[in-house]
Amino acid sequence: MPASRSICVFCGSRPGHDPAHAAAAGALGHAIAAEGWRLVYGAGDVGLMGEVARAATAAGAATLGIIPAHLMKREQGRRDLTTFLVTETMHERKKVMFMNADAIVVLPGGAGSLDEFFEVLTWAQIGLHRKPILLLDSKGYWQPLLALIDHVIAEGFADAGLRALFTAVPDVETATASLRAALA
């Protein structure tokens, strides 16, 4: 796999209540490094964001962190990254993250992670990209979201093909294998 592959990780700026999610974030950071990929993420040093970045950095991965100026204190912008960019807005942050990634992995998170997932999913739905999108369903975290998407399809507000635009995976090992295959 070429070292130039970059994986954008969207995830929570909080750790959540279940330590399994932080463990998955750390394992993903290690896997990104082990594959020779670069981590692209929101540049925070808190929550799952911090966990994935610490693991990737410790394992030797190249890292690109993008953070809007107004979140520098709240998300404790991590400055020991390979590349650290400060943007003016959240929209610019998401755009730069997406443009610098070959694939997207969404770990558990809150409203921000949902926003990021639905934005890249919508872009895929309208034909703006074909990048792999993975939902890392740590301990079944995304099951309610998957049920909602199935409901949207069943109610006729989306084509059944919407489900083919992303892949839900149960663990980091499956995510890594899926990324490896998709980026080959």
Image (cartoon, helix red, strand yellow):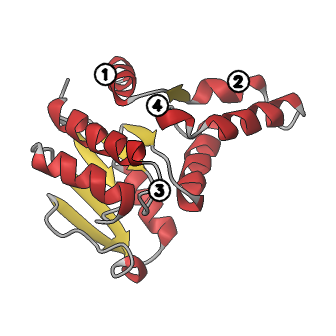
Q: CA distance from mark 1 to mark 4?
A: 11 Å
Mark earlier in primary sequence (3, 1): 3
Task: Work out which quarter of the rendered image holds the N terminus and state it.
Answer: top left
**Label 1 SS:** helix
Image position, residue 17 (x, y; %)? 48, 55
Q: Amino acid at mark 2?
A: Gly
Task: Work out which quarter of the rendered image holds the C terminus and state it.
Answer: top left
State if disc 3 and disc 2 touch (CB < 8 Å). no
Residue position for label 4: 132
Q: CA distance from mark 2 to mark 4?
A: 14 Å
Image position, residue 171 (x, y; %)? 41, 28
**Label 3 SS:** loop
Question: Which label is found at residue 161?
Answer: 2
Question: Which label is found at residue 16?
Answer: 3
Residue at figure coordinates x 34%, y 82% from the top left: 73
Bin the neighbour count of mark 3 within 10 Å (Cα to Cα): few under 14, some 14-19, many 20 and up. Answer: some
